[in-house]
Amino acid sequence: MTINIFQAVLLGIMASLTSVIGALGTTYSWYTLSRPLVASLVVGIILGDVTTSIMVGAAIQVVYIALVTPGGTVSADLRAVCYIGIPLAVAAVKGAGLDPASVQGAGLAVSIGALVGTVGTVMFYSTATMNLIWQQIGWKAIDKLNYKTIYLTNFVFPLISHFVIAFLPTFFITYYGTNVVANLKEWLPMNGIPMKTMFTLGSLLPAVGIGILLKQVVQNPIDLIIFFFGFTLAAALKINLVGAAFVGAMIAFLNYKIIMIGSAGKKAAASNEEDL
Amino acid sequence: MTVKLTKKTKDSAFWWWYNGNLTGFTHQHMQTFGFMCAMIPVIKELYKDDEHRLRSLKTYTPFFNTEPQIGSIVVGISVGLEEARANGHEEIDDEMINGIRAGLMGPLAGIGDSLIPGTYIPILLSIALGLSSGGSVLGPIFYAVVYISTMTFFMKYIFDKGYELGGRAVDVIIGDQAVAFRESMVMLGTIVIGSLAASWIGVSTALKFNLGTYFNAAGESVKSVLVLNDVLNGIYPNLLSLLTVLFTWYLMTKRKMSPITVMLILVVIALVGVLVGFFDPGLSY
């Protein structure tokens, strides 16, 4: 599989727009177009193979299921994972002749995605640093009440940062890189140690995504029971994810009712005491 | 004479924030310029002289950063306060507005991060992943449509609440009912994530033990092989994946490691595991 100039340009544009600090706003760019699952649909349309792309994107999505960016620190700016990682992973999986739905296909995709994710971190910090130039212009505009320049500072000048720091690397890596990964099997045998490690790593990495999420919601180890409950629904009872969401919603609903009854009881007790 | 902002101006403040809350990000001033851009239409409508305009614009120059979606409530509150200030409420000065802004951004970032990217998005993505099996476009489309529509509605709702109620609007987010709702959402999220982990993580071992040969009833010699993976899955299905998740949770929570460090540890484990034969994807060309 090769990528032509036109496709590489489109991927570069998408990478420029969809950073956490990208041009299309938090809601529909960072939290939508920069989720690997959604991005895989866009990449699939650009590459002309939607099915493979979505299977690859779904596997990569699990690793980044719970990405939170507290105070502007990012472990990976997902635009690199989405618009460099997914195209390369699609090329690699197809080049190796793997079924993207298989554990091995997913493993290879996840490893490539995570590797490229580190590029995203560099992109994030570089863009934020380059934006300092535009903010200098913006500060001067405030005293002159030059509204137009303030808007340009926030919306238009940062596009220059994105062009330099996201568009160019995405364009070159996807344009030249797909050939390299598509011929992976010529220089790395699949039963050799590097490839075996790569596949294994791909099966381990999604656990980190889940771990990040658990870290936020489970402070007390006893709360792990809630997680085990969900795991058991799928692993032992074979309930699919939509079904598990409904079982979970029922439990959450009961929990909400119990808390509200509890706080109503407290309020009633407090007002009784006042009456006495 | 009281000035009242038109609906058009309030809406344009909301949409400037919605589209540009982080676009000019630097580590020095994260969302400051995004906030200012949202306030410009309000300031222009409320004040006709440059002196007041400059004073009010400068009110919004101190550092601002929070979870931007839940943070739209702060923009709503500021619009309401600015309108009150234009109507001669002298107790509303820079100090008061910035006290509210600075006081809210920390707590709202905590609530917003744990509720939106920490709970709501993983739940939606888990369902979407379930819908996209076999490469179906249903999953991505489901996520995009549901997330964008609900989040836009939510942001507009709390923006309007912020404008109407001012500082009291915070009860919408930290009142009794809101806390109970949030805790229940987190519970739902944890359950769904458990199911997601079981369906999408497939850690398995290739280790086999030869237990020697024995003769069966028909007198044929049979090799007895213990397949470790089958034994483990007999104890609890997908046990190795569960243990891997717990291991990463342990490293990050109890050992305070960063996700990157944990990933590097997994690289080492994968390599060592392959070398000793514990892991083997079993592929060849």
Image: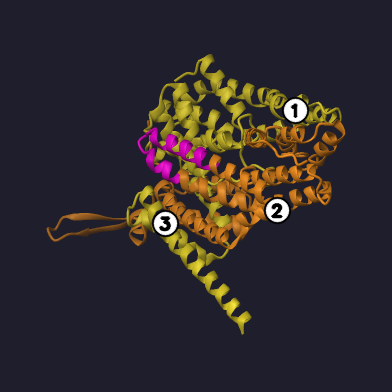
Q: Quadrant of residue B49?
A: top right
- Residue ID for mark 3: A248
Spot occupied by residue A64 in the image (x, y as percentages of width and height): 53, 42
Residue placed furthest toward the front:
B1
Looking at the image, which residue is at 73% across and 28% down?
A151
Tag 1, which secondary structure?
helix
Residue extent of the magenta highlight: B126-151
In the rendered image, residues at marks 2 and 3 fall on the same chain:
no
- Residue ID for mark 2: B167
- Chain for numbered disc 2: B
Decide whether residue B129 is among the magenta residues.
yes
Residue type, numbered disc 1: Thr
Residue placed furthest toward the top:
A5
- Chain for numbered disc 3: A
Q: Callout 2: 10 Å neighbours few (<14), some, many (20+)?
A: many
Q: Callout 1: 10 Å neighbours few (<14), some, many (20+)?
A: many
Q: Colour of chain B?
A: orange
Looking at the image, which residue is at 71% across and 49% down?
B105
In the rendered image, residues at marks 2 and 1 fall on the same chain:
no
Residue type, numbered disc 3: Gly
Distance from the alpha carbon under mark 2 to that under mark 1: 30 Å
- Chain in yellow on the image: A
- Residue ID for mark 1: A153
- Chain for numbered disc 1: A
Magenta segment, prevailing SS (helix, strand or loop): helix
- Front of the two marks 2 and 1: 2
Spot occupied by residue B194 in the image (x, y as percentages of width and height): 44, 54
Question: In the image shown, does A196 or A106 lie closer to the viewer?
Answer: A106
Spot occupied by residue B91 in the image (x, y as percentages of width and height): 83, 52
Q: Quadrant of residue B27?
A: top right
